[in-house]
Image (cartoon, grey):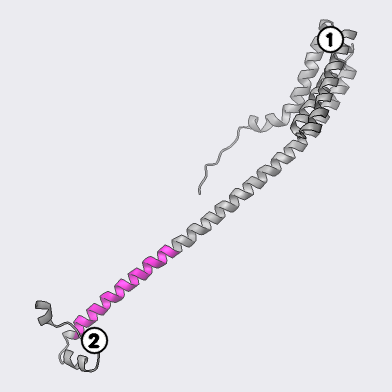
Amino acid sequence: MNEPIVARHWLAIVTPKAAPAIATTTVLALARIWNANGAEHSVGNAALMTVLSAGAAAAGVAAGNSTGDSVLVGTAFAASGALAFAGVAGYTDGLPLPLLLWSLATAGAYALAARYWRTDRRETVTYERDMTDRREERAHVERVETLRATTQVEVARTGAAYAEQLAAALVHRATLPGFDPAALERTGLPELPTTERKSA
């Protein structure tokens, strides 16, 4: 019933939210390093990134048509966009266009991630509600069973107390002066054991 309270570290909460920005910033940084090392105005490198980007997009379309797995399709299109972004950022000589593409890519990544975050949050809330309902149902069953057991114990105690009181009353009545067991038998009441029968 009592579950431990687990406080998540702030890094564990922030990291998933920062992942899209970290990814696009990493691509931008690597593309600019690649630019400084010979990719600037290199038609061969730009053609390579174009082919890779088109291949990743085609893989996303094929995955969507064959499996319909939205995670796989999203991953393929994200890879295609990242390759196109890296190709442009590596080919151009200035920073304005790469920074513009970086901002667009980051906004797009957050738009895609928000959809998955909403789905994940919805599933988490549904799971928590289901678990709360199950806990409440089990707690209700436990309370009912506890009441039933307590009632049975109280009934047993009441019966035992009544039997003790009846026995004490019979013993007390037998000791009263003028008590005649034979008169009780004549009236049709059940026969009471006598001291002679007890001794026999």
Q: Residues within 10 Å of mark 2 (few under 14, many from 20)?
A: few
Q: Is residue 179 visible?
A: no
- Can you tell which of label 1 and label 2 is closer to the viewer? 2
The residue furthest top is: 38
Rendering quarter of residue 175: bottom left
Q: Is residue 149 magenta?
A: yes
Q: Secondary structure at mark 1?
A: helix
Comes first in the chain, label 1 or label 2: 1
Residue 53 numbered tag:
none
Rendering quarter of residue 108: top right
The residue furthest front is: 66
Our reading of the magenta stretch's main secondary structure is helix
Q: Is residue 175 above or below residue 105?
A: below
Estimate the x, y position of residue 91 in percent, counting from the top left.
Answer: 88, 12
Q: Amino acid at mark 1?
A: Asn
Q: On the rendered image, what quadrant is the C terminus found in?
A: bottom left
Q: Residues within 10 Å of mark 1 (few under 14, many from 20)?
A: many
Q: Secondary structure at mark 2?
A: loop
| Residue 34 or residue 80, whichever sits in front | 80
Q: Which residue is mark 2?
A: 190
Q: Answer left or right for 168 relative to 75.
A: left
Q: Answer left or right for 15 relative to 49.
A: left
Query: Which contiguous range is marked in magenta?
Result: 148-173
Q: Which residue is mark 1?
A: 35
| Residue 8 or residue 194, whichever sits in front | 194
Estimate the x, y position of residue 193 in percent, counting from the top left.
Answer: 17, 82
Q: Amino acid at mark 2?
A: Pro
Q: Residue at x 73, y 40 (%)?
A: 119
Q: Residue at x 23, y 86 (%)?
A: 190
